[in-house]
Image (tube, coloured by chain):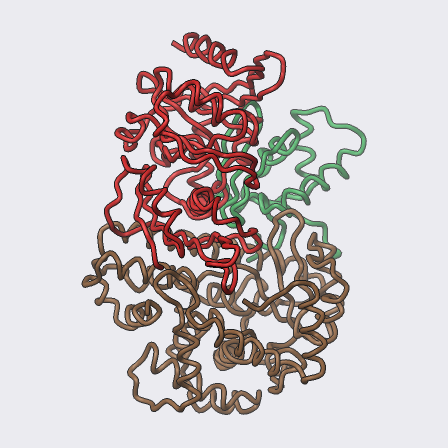
Amino acid sequence: MGEPAIWCRCNEGEILLRQIDGLMLAYHRPSGLTHMLASPLPEIWGALDAEPVSAETLLERLSAHYDLGKNALAELTAHLEELAALGLIRERACATA
Amino acid sequence: MSARTLMALLREPSGASGLGARAWNGVISAARAERLLGTLAVRLEGVEVPEGGRAVLVDALLDTEREARIALWEADRAARALAPLGLEPILLKGAAYAAAGLEAGRGRMIGDLDILVPRDRLDEAEAALLDAGWEWVKPDPYDDAYYRQWMHELPPLIHRERDRMIDVHHTILPLTARPKPDAAELVAESVGVGGGLRVLSPEDRVCHAVAHLFADGDLSGGLRNLWDVRCLLGEMGDEAALERRAARHGLGAHLARARRLADHVFGARGERLSLADRLFLCRLLARDGWGRDGAKLLGLAFYIRSHVLRMPPLMLARHLWTKWRKGHRPV
Amino acid sequence: MRHSLTLTIGPARFRIGSAWKEPIARLRALYAAYPQEEGVADFTVRLEPAGVGRRWWRPSVRIAGDHMLPDALPMALRHGLLAAEMGMNLQMALGWRRHLLIHASSVEKDGRALVMTGESGSGKSTLAALLGERGWRFMGDEFALIDLADGKVHPFPRLVSLKNASVAAMRVEVVDGARFGPLMRGTPKGDIAHLVPPAAATARMGEAAAPALLLFPRYGFARDIRPVGQGEAFMRLTQASTNYVALGEAGFETLHRFVTGVPALAVDYESGEEALELIDALWADLS
């Protein structure tokens, strides 16, 4: 548990995405649940890819496009955990599996 | 009686092509009531069915496929919640059959997720699940105390966002039941299926299905449980190991009866049935062509019997009284 | 069961069994224009005595069948027709998988469908019944069935269930008294009478129509029209659908296509006439 978590979007086949009115609708096949994602979740999701990265690296990527506040890393980590709990992204475990 | 037609079709699917609409409607209703419609749909793949019948079967298959997918996701979430404890949940019943790709899982309705954890880790597991978003379903203190004191599982938990239930077991029969399965052995012999999940050993899977069929519950829905037993026995390699295992769990006689009934209902009918077996058979095949339980009185007798099996008589009286006062009737 | 009937409404066939003669006789008569030949049913509904002896003594109907609510309260036999209708609705709500099912009324004109959804009391049922008498084809007052492949609306034109004041309102509209079922007073939903849909509704109940407008009507509020965003429409329709979750990916795709392809408006109104006038104007704007 001591290692820093890394995150990825290596489960893309499990998710179906649709845009409506500037919102992102995500249908998660394994759970059968629909999620309506509001900013900044779609942006975070979009900045990830299949290659696992740390929250710090992701923060650098996002900073290139967005003006992020002081607590950016803590907030980003909370959002990543939220997305992972929904199954929309994965944390380290699947990268090695 | 339609449960008998259902039984005949599960045994020999080709009989479906000869059925008229009326008989077919009876089979569908009986199968729905017994939660065997998806199983029937799997058995009847490629067999000619009366016009209009295929659509009903396709619907049922889609439902069970979705159920299995969601059950595996719930299992995955439970594994994630328990992983920090170094604990891998052992899946039971439907979710286990789906995770292990067993025949019993094909077309089976799953519903709640059942998992087994070692009894001495129960409190930790409960805390971890509560922490991961599950919460208590039953607000009733009597029920809660009853579960904790006498049952083989925690009171059911429901996930507050996903709205799915999980039953956390520490053994496969209530503590008050006469057979005392060796829970530590169940855990020790369990096998990993990947993704941080485990299932019981092949022998223990049969033992659990048999225990579930007779000792736990009032035998309503027993036809589906008997189908599970039939499928699990069919995929069983070492028969001698199974006998030893059942004896160890105190389920030897149960296994023998389940074998005879499964053989009679779904198999070659090579074994003679005892008088008591025939009573069980009547109960199992009581569903009529409108999906009604045709043996209400017999059902009540079995309900009382199931409680006698689980609880000593005084406790039973107290329990039934508390239940009845609250308006619960076993119908 | 002693008495039974097979009934086809839109794409669904029901087998209804009853311990009593009256509910079946009523259904047979009110659904005279619908196919009633025996065949493989999608659903079975049972009207059975709620307890031992309750077939004769203070007869009480339990609504049962393939899909049941465990704690549904039994109903008086004089409300048996309502029990049968509720039983059929319950089967559809819990068991139908061949369309996305939205709790909504629908009517059709020029090959295009108007879908109206809202809570009980929004007036969606009465509005559909009124429109059905005034040049629109009535498609259903309870469920709109959205095709999973092409997004069209399929009719489910069961009897219209008129409640309380709507009964009198429709008696003014429909001259033919034979189209009304008995007035059932004091049901759990108030006073109820059923209305047989116009002949065109039954004759064309296999005919789907592409949705052109989605309304969220609200009765009893000062006249107002507001656009409803796609996100809000999506949310509200998932709540108005009884099988969205059960359909999984197909439901998601179908609902997404629906909300992105069909304009949605919330409409407040104070009288039936006002609503009809609003609907006519909105419909004219579309083309």
Give C164 or A58, whichever is nearer the viewer: C164
Does B281 sit above or below residue B9?
below
Does C273 sit above or below residue A17?
above
User: Residue at image x 40%, y 54%?
Assistant: C20
Q: In the image, is B289 to the left or to the right of C101?
A: left
Task: Look at the image and tell me in which quarter the C terminus of chain B lies.
Answer: bottom right
Does B201 sit above or below residue C160?
below
Task: Look at the image and tell me in which quarter the N terminus of chain B lies.
Answer: bottom left
Identify by letter the chain in brown.
B
Shown colour of chain C = red
Shown colour of chain A = green
Give B184 or C202, whichever is nearer the viewer: C202
In this view, which residue lies farthest toward the left?
A: B18
Give B101 or B170, whichever is nearer the viewer: B170
* Number of numbered callouts drawn: 0
Q: Quadrant of residue B153?
A: bottom right
Q: In the image, is B225 to the left or to the right of B148?
A: left
x then y, percent, for residue B93: 51, 69
In this view, which residue lies farthest toward the front?
A: C57
Q: In the image, is A83 to the left or to the right of B126?
A: left
User: Residue at image x 66%, y 63%?
Assistant: B327
Can residue C248 be seen in the rendering of this structure? no
x then y, percent, for residue C78: 48, 45
x then y, percent, for residue A68: 74, 27
x then y, percent, for residue B330: 57, 69
User: Residue at image x 33%, y 39%?
Assistant: C9
Can residue C179 be seen in the rendering of this structure? yes
Q: Quadrant of residue A35?
A: top right
